[in-house]
Image (cartoon, rainbow, N blue to C red):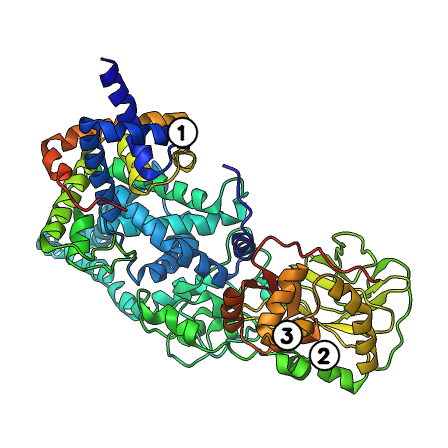
Amino acid sequence: MAQRRRCEWITERLHDWLRGTLPASQAEEVRRHLEACASCQKEERFLRNLLQTARSLPRLAPPPTLKTAIWARIAQAQRPQPTQRWAWLRPQGWARPVLRWGWAAGVALLLVMAWHFWERPRPRAALEESAPMVMEAAPAPQAVEPPAASTALPAMPKEEKAPGLAPPVRLRQRPSPPKATKTPPPPMGAKPSPPRLVLPPPPMEQARIALPPETTAVGEAPAPQAPPIAEPPKAPPQPLETLRETVEPQPLELQRPAAHEEEKARPSPAPREPEPKSRDFLSPRMALPMRRAQEGVPSGAAGMPGATFERRLEPEAIPELELALSRPLRPRVTSTLTLRMRSLVPLSGSLRVFVEEPGLGMEVVGRGRFRALEEQVLWEVMLLPEGSWRQEQLRLYPRRDGLHRLAIEWRPVGREEWMRLWTLLLPALEERGGTPGSYQAQGEPLQQALALWSQRTGLAIALWNHLNFPVQALWAAEAPLAALQQWGKAVGLRVEQRGFLVLIRPMGAVSTERSLAPP
Amino acid sequence: MAAKPDFEEEWLLERCRRGEREAFDELFERYLPLVYNLALRLLDDPETAEDVVQETFLRVYQNLPRFAGRSRLSTWIYRITVNLCHDEHRRAGRHPTPFSLLTAAEEGEAQEWMERIPEEGMGPEDQVLRKERQRVLWQAVQRLREPFRTTLILCDLEEWDYGEVAEVMGVAEGTVKSRLNRARRLLRKELEPFRELFEGGERPSP
């Protein structure tokens, strides 16, 4: 009896034992019992096979079209129903059957009236002429044939309208909102996107961020004309007919599986706005600090204690702009701050931010046009010895989705300043595990050296796309993100892109807050 | 379950909340196979599973801005999937075409997403045996009634931990355990006629 109860206790735990989730003490007990008990062994074999079979059940790869279908479903869900426009004209509730029969009643009434009016002159004639005339009135029902024929008429306009049926649906998807007058045309203007696939932003964002069509189209039609959305923003609304023509009438192929891949594969379009300067800014090759350093930039920062934001707004811009520092800056080499800008209208203007500390100081100047209504910008601000850095400029970083990000350009004042900076930093770095250079001196390749150094010091290396940080990390800016990530994986670093920012950190939990205090 | 800090996922979420299409794409990419296979197991019908997957991601897309992050993102997505599967199950009643998961896999209509348990060293007999076992097991699982079927699928086939199953099914962990025990007993009963099939020796698992 006791043995049986024992076996029951064991079999209850066999599942967990086989899955390895049984506490160690119990697992040991089960193991010992199994060695001795034949019936439990049998049970264990049964369960083991069951579990193996369960694990061997197939897992299928989702059909390749499924993702496209999801996007199509999303687009469909966001599109207002085509019937809604005239829905208010539709009879509702009790009115529906009444009106339906009302039509019949109306037609009947018409017939009666036609008959009546046809007949009306007749009595007079009947009075004047003979009774056979009344017999002639028999063809009178023919008089209603014109109405009968006219009921056939709608068929013709229908045929005319048929090709235009799809476009109205599309037009409704992209009602040109008043906001559109403020947003410049999106960069993908030259390529029409099938509006059926228009992807509106998720509900909460809808009011705030206007996604450009490029990001919204799942499939791409090869038709070359400009779609309505590419119209100049302030153009008066076009009449329906002309708009219909601009939309290519080709049937949409929502399910085309390759559509999305095509879109992905297409190189990102050149931004519409002319930006000769930010172009070179975007290219990491052009923006290496060391190269800038040789140019030399005149100095002249005004010293202000504490962190100050100065709002200097251009006339048309920014009625409401919140600027908030994530926390007060401390006099250390690196400090992270979050600048949160929130505005009720698309921003357009320049932004000047001074971050000054007595003794340690730098200036950040922001300029440029902002289109996003809400933008969170992470800055890793380096507070450096005064005079070593000059005029960091905030620039716009055009992105594929049309939202502009800020990027910061750093300019070391000159080579001497760089050297001064390094002599200042080196002792602190060495104290924490040397410099990448020292590892390189030991024969490690640069990447390995950087990784070792980073792991030893626990220092996060923050890179902007065009990079500003330790000189040894410059090479990284020139590598595409995928390559960086691959490298990171190999050497134990985590490479992530956060907006315009590329973060390289050791895989372990290392706080980016850790930074060097100036000696 | 306490939300684990997952930097990558948080950042992905943040981007999704901003309405970045690419972020959603990434999110879909990440969860599509998982959600699809979950739906496939719960519904055993590829077509309906596709429907459910679409609906799941539509809801994810619509509700993500309101997702507060109290549970893990995966848990939240799975809960949507499981609920939709339940609705679908309730609507369709008993499934009319059983074993389509296995048929789909066998017919090679669909590529297998995950490697099965390695089959090297397995003779043709073993393979036949395994297929037969799969068929019998899958059939038996599908015959279980709710909520035992779902509990068993999530716990023993998907091998989730009890806490996650509890969260996804919206019940207490204790309930999951008792349901699972019951489900295992029921499954056992279903498999009783095939006992020999499972007692035979395949290689013991490592």
Q: Residue furthest bottom?
A: A295
Disc nearer the start of the sequence (1/2): 1
Residue A3 placed where, x, y %? 24, 17
Q: Are marks 3 and 1 on the same chain?
A: yes
Chain to which the residue tagged by mark 2 belongs: A
Amino acid type, mark 2:
Pro
Q: Find disc 2 in the rendering and name its residue.
A: A289
Q: Which mark is residue A442?
A: 3
Q: Find disc 1 in the rendering and name its residue.
A: A25
Say what secondary structure mark 2 lies in. Answer: helix
Q: Distance between the residues labelled 3 and 1?
A: 50 Å
Amino acid type, mark 1:
Ser
Say what secondary structure mark 3 lies in. Answer: loop
Q: How far apart are marks 1 and 2 (CA)?
A: 61 Å
Q: Which of marks 1 and 2 is in front?
A: 1
Residue A181 can be seen in this image: no
Q: Quadrant of the C terminus of chain A?
A: bottom right
Q: In which quarter of the image is the N terminus of chain A?
A: top left
Q: Which residue is drawn at 40% across and 51% down?
A: B57
Residue A484 can be seen in this image: yes
Dividing the picture into quarters, in which one does residue A460 lie? bottom right
Say what secondary structure mark 1 lies in. Answer: helix
Q: Residue at x 24, y 44 (%)?
A: A52
Residue B85 placed where, x, y %? 31, 41
Amino acid type, mark 3:
Gln
Q: Distance between the residues labelled 2 and 3?
A: 26 Å
Residue A504 placed where, x, y %? 60, 64
